[in-house]
Image (cartoon, helix red, strand yellow):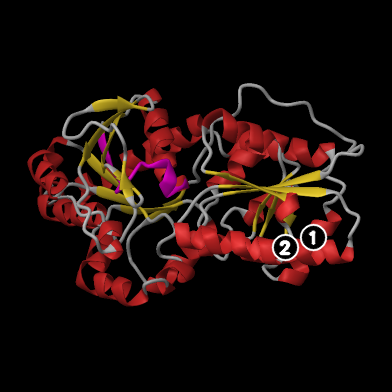
Amino acid sequence: MRVLHLIPSISPRRGGPSQAVLAMTSALRHQGVEASILTTNDDGPDHLSGFPLGRWHEHAGVPVLAFARWSPPLRVLREFAVSPALVSWLRSHLADYDLLHVHALFSFPSTVGMALARRRGVPYIVRTIGQLQHWSLRQSSCRKRLLLGLIERRNLQGASALHFTSDAERREAASLTLSTPSFVLPLGVELPQVFGQLVSERLDAPVRFLFLSRLHPKKQLPLLLQALALMRRRRPHAQWHLDIAGDGEPAYVAELRRQADQLGLTEQLQWHGFVAGQAKAELLQKADWFVLPSAAENFGIAAIEALASGTPVILTPEVGIASQIGAAGAGRLVEGNVEALAECLMKSLMGPSVTMRQAARRLAETSFCWDAIAIELKTAYANSLNAVVEESPACRSF
């Protein structure tokens, strides 16, 4: 089975969806699926440095083919990731694949890729990466309504299946009344090779909170900063520390730093910027709590990475995996307002119990293991291909 994964960017700066496709493709290849990735050299405002263009190469252990993203001065056009060379290649080679797995909507590579697949009769699956959730549809709503009316609704309707990563994501997408079949299959994480010693006593060390994500308004870092300031007023002698890992638009990051200074939190915060590899692993394992008070999150891959490190999480209900966290006792759920979050943080000042840390690790092992997910995804591919065969005129004539 030959499957082409199409995504506008695999830059780490684009967050979890871009990174997940690399691990997903690798896991599928271990299951005997001939999976590869087609993308652009997008790296946010810039381009991926030293990234080979126009030829297949191995990246993170999987075959990747990247083409140049057009970079006009207008940010909105850069975000659309226009790549004429990518489209030209798709026109010539799309029919070489049994299935196209598209990741993302409202972006030139994915939008044009789905349209070409419809016209060429190549079955395709769409991972919507949360872009059909209500919060996401309200952002740049005029542009998205226009694209839905012009082409994206037809693209979604023409898919063999929609791939959602949580039940919550599928429920919100139902408001579009699409008739396309869908399935829910989470993303996975690589379990750390070395799992740190579980600690039951805090001793005199300050509790460590970790915010690790793209610095984007959706993640609601200002809410966390305000809650911490309120906690400090109520518990002035409490010992705590917040690590902030991630980057975003420079103007927005500067505003976040100004807000932290105005709230008087500077001494208890450390800004790490974008982290990856060993630096990221160390932050996850050193943390007592991973905190993500997001306004909308179809899944929350960074939260799963925290679980895999044995670090319990504090999430708002709007994070797609929140209900699983609560059911497993792997963290705490809190409403997305300053008062509720401050109360939750105060209750967390003693750090998580060993039982909660064990529950966090166990949930990652049992529900978010890439090997098991790849097996289910391979089955979903087979089901989609079988459905296409059954619906073909030749089969219906028998």
Residue ID for mark 1: 344
Disc 2 marks which amino acid?
A: Val
Image quadrant of residue 191? top right
Secondary structure of the residue carrying numbered label 2: loop
Q: Residue at x 43, y 74 (%)?
A: 138
Query: CA–CA distance between discs 1 and 2?
Result: 7 Å
The magenta stretch spans which residues? 3-15
Residue 176: x %, y % from top left: 37, 72
Question: Split into 4 quadrants, where in the image is the N terminus?
Answer: top left
Q: Which residue is drawn at 58% across and 35% down?
A: 280
Q: Visible in this render: residue 170?
A: yes
The label on residue 246 is: none
Check the image and report above or below for 345 versus 234. above
Tags 1 and 2 touching, CB below 8 Å: yes
Check the image and report above or below for 318 versus 61. below
Which residue is situated farthest in the bottom direction here?
Answer: 142
Q: Nearer the viewer, residue 195 or 273?
A: 273
Give neighbour class at mark 1: few <14, some 14-19, many 20+ (Cα, 10 Å): some
